[in-house]
Image (spheres, rainbow, N blue to C red):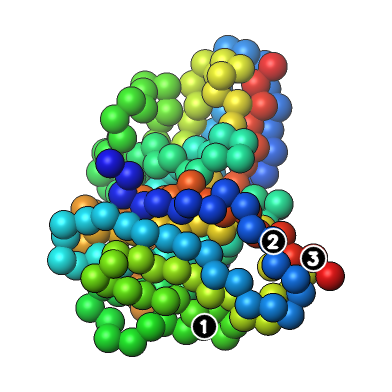
Amino acid sequence: AQKITQTQPGMFVQEKEAVTLDCTYDTSDPSYGLFWYKQPSSGEMIFLIYQGSYDQQNATEGRYSLNFQKARKSANLVISASQLGDSAMYFCAMREDSNTDKLIFGTGTRLQVFP
Amino acid sequence: GAVVSQHPSRVICKSGTSVKIECRSLDFQATTMFWYRQFPKKSLMLMATSNEGSKATYEQGVEKDKFLINHASLTLSTLTVTSAHPEDSSFYICSASAAFPYNEQFFGPGTRLTVL
């Protein structure tokens, strides 16, 4: 079974609008962390935001926020006020704390921001 | 955030040669580094976990003798692709774990390997 599922291979959003990128996960580990990374065409992986399984509040980092719904096992990324530079691949990843810090990545969502 | 460098960024080699890729954590010490492989338009596939001073832990299906990993210091890990073949052509990315604040992985810029 897929541990991390990103069901949207591609998304379009108009500049200045908000967009939600979906991510669901599957784990039996009570302690885990969820990450979002951005990969522009240059290839580098850029860390965006982190949510711990025991965190009571949704994580926020500037224009990025994570809509964490633990019961549904979802960790959607919300990008507000989209910019042209947000066009990239976005990967959701999970670390199970019992599993030696390894990250398990989803298949990614390609976001394209248009003017 | 923490900075991880990778060298070279791009390499083209002939089939049968060996290629070494370096991964360095520039402003922090990383006891653990990870090596990933990414095919075009695909996700990252973890190849191995590299621990300073000990043998790397390889993921299932990854050939240890083909992808040699050395983690000689807290700031340097190397991946050597031995006797490279065209099917080894890929984008290789390393990452290093920083202890704080989230124990997150910081990634290098990647190395694009093309084997002719």
Amino acid type, label 2? Phe
Q: Residue at x 41, y 82 (%)?
A: A59
- Closest to the observer, B115 or A99: A99
Amino acid type, label 3? Phe
- Please name which of the two marks, 1 or 3, marks the residue nearer to the observer: 3
Report, in whole angstroms, how far the alpha carbon at label 2 lies from the one at label 3. Answer: 7 Å
Q: From this viewpoint, which residue is outermost toward the top?
A: B16
Amino acid type, label 1? Glu
Q: Residue at x 27, y 86 (%)?
A: A56
Residue B29 makes an appearance in the image: no
- Closest to the observer, B112 or A10: A10
Please name the residue that numbered disc 2 is placed on. A12
Asked if labels 1 and 2 share a chain, the reply is: yes
Q: Chain of mark 2?
A: A
Q: Are marks 2 and 3 in contact (CB under 8 Å)?
A: yes
Q: Is residue A69 left or right of residue B7?
A: left
